[in-house]
Amino acid sequence: MAPLTAEGVLAKLRSLSTDREISILKLSEPISTAVTQLQDSHQRTSDISTSSLDATTPSSLEADLTHYRELFAKLRFSYVEQVTKEKFIRAIVGDPPLIVSPQENVDLEKENLEAKATLKALKTEVAGMVTELEEKAKELSRKYERVQVETVKLEELPDKIAKLESAIAGLKETQAVGLDPNPELNLPLVKTLDLVESKKHQRAELDRQLEQLQNQVPRKKKELDRLQAELQPLETKRQNSMAAAKEAKRRKEAALGGVEDDLEERGRWFRAAEAGLKQVLEMNS
C-alpha cells in the first residue's frame, strides 16, 4: 500500500466534504416542511414567525423549541379540559345516565398513577437521551471545526513543502560549490552546534560585563559630580589669574620706570601661580 501524501489526504477530505454537507438548515428541513404544511392545512394557532426557519441558527432553534414546549403544554391542558367536559356532559345527558361507582374511580386512579409513573420514566429517559445527543452534537461540532482548520493548514502545506525543498536544494548547491566566503557557514552540523554554543557563552560573558558596568554607572556619576564641584572654584581662580595676568601685561607695556619693573615682577608671580594651578587641574583630571 502506497504511503498517503498531503495531496491524497486533501483530496479525500474534499470528497467527504462534498458528499456530506453538514448544515443546520439541512437538519431543520423536515421541521420547516412540517410547519409549512400544517399552516397550509390549518389556521395558525401560535404567534411564532416562520422567518426564523429562513435563517436557522442554534440560538433560534433553542428559542423555537422552548416556544413549542410551552405551546404544547397549553394545548395539552386545553385538550384534557375539553375532553373531560365532553365526557361529563355525555354522562349526564345520556340515556340512561352513566353512573360511575367509587370502586371504578379507585381503579381508574390506580391506572392513572401507573400511567403517570410510566410517562415520567419515559420522560426521564428521553431527557437523558436528549442531553446525550446534545453533548455528542457539540463534540461533533468541535471536531468538525477542528477538521476545517486542519484542512486549511493542509491546503497550505504543499506550497510550504515546495518552498522548503527549494531552499534545501539551494543550500546544498551552495555548500557543494563552496560559494560562501564565510568559512563558519560551511561547517558540519556538529561543529556548527559547538560554534553556536561558544557564541552563546561569549554573549553571556558580555552581558555579565555590561551588567557590571551598568551597576558602576551611578557611582561613577556621583564621583564625576564631586570632581566637577571641586573643579569649579579652581576654574574660577584660573580665570581670575588669567585676567590679572592680562591686565598686568597691559600695564607693563603702558608703564614706565620703576612701575614697569614692579609690574614685571607681579607678572612673573602670576605666571608661576598659573603654572601651579594647571598642574593641580591635571592631577585632578
Image (spheres, rainbow, N blue to C red):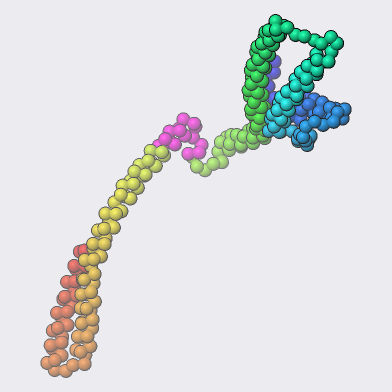
Q: Between residues 199 and 149, which one lies in front from this camera angle?
A: 149
Residue at 26% from the left image edge and 60% from the top image edge: 224
Residue at 78% from the left image edge and 16% from the top image edge: 88
Locate residue 68, reporting x and y percent.
Answer: 73, 28
- In magenta segment, residue 204: no
Tell me: residue 269, above or below residue 127.
below
Q: Is residue 60 left or right of residue 197?
A: right
In which quadrant of the rendered image does the N terminus lie? top right
Tell me: residue 27, above or below residue 110.
below
- In magenta segment, residue 186: yes
In which quadrant of the rendered image does the C terminus lie? bottom left
Q: Is residue 199 visible?
A: yes
What main secondary structure does the magenta stretch of the protein show? helix
Residue at the limit of the structure toward the right, as seen here: 41
Q: Is residue 122 visible?
A: no
Residue at 35% from the left image edge and 42% from the top image edge: 205
Locate residue 113, reporting x and y percent.
Answer: 66, 11
Q: Is residue 13 left or right of residue 165?
A: right
Residue at the limit of the structure toward the bottom, as seen here: 256
Residue at 12% from the left image edge and 88% from the top image edge: 262
Q: Is residue 104 left or right of residue 259?
A: right
Q: Which residues are magenta?
A: 184-198
Locate residue 251, reporting x and y percent.
Answer: 20, 89
Tell me: residue 91, above or below residue 44.
above
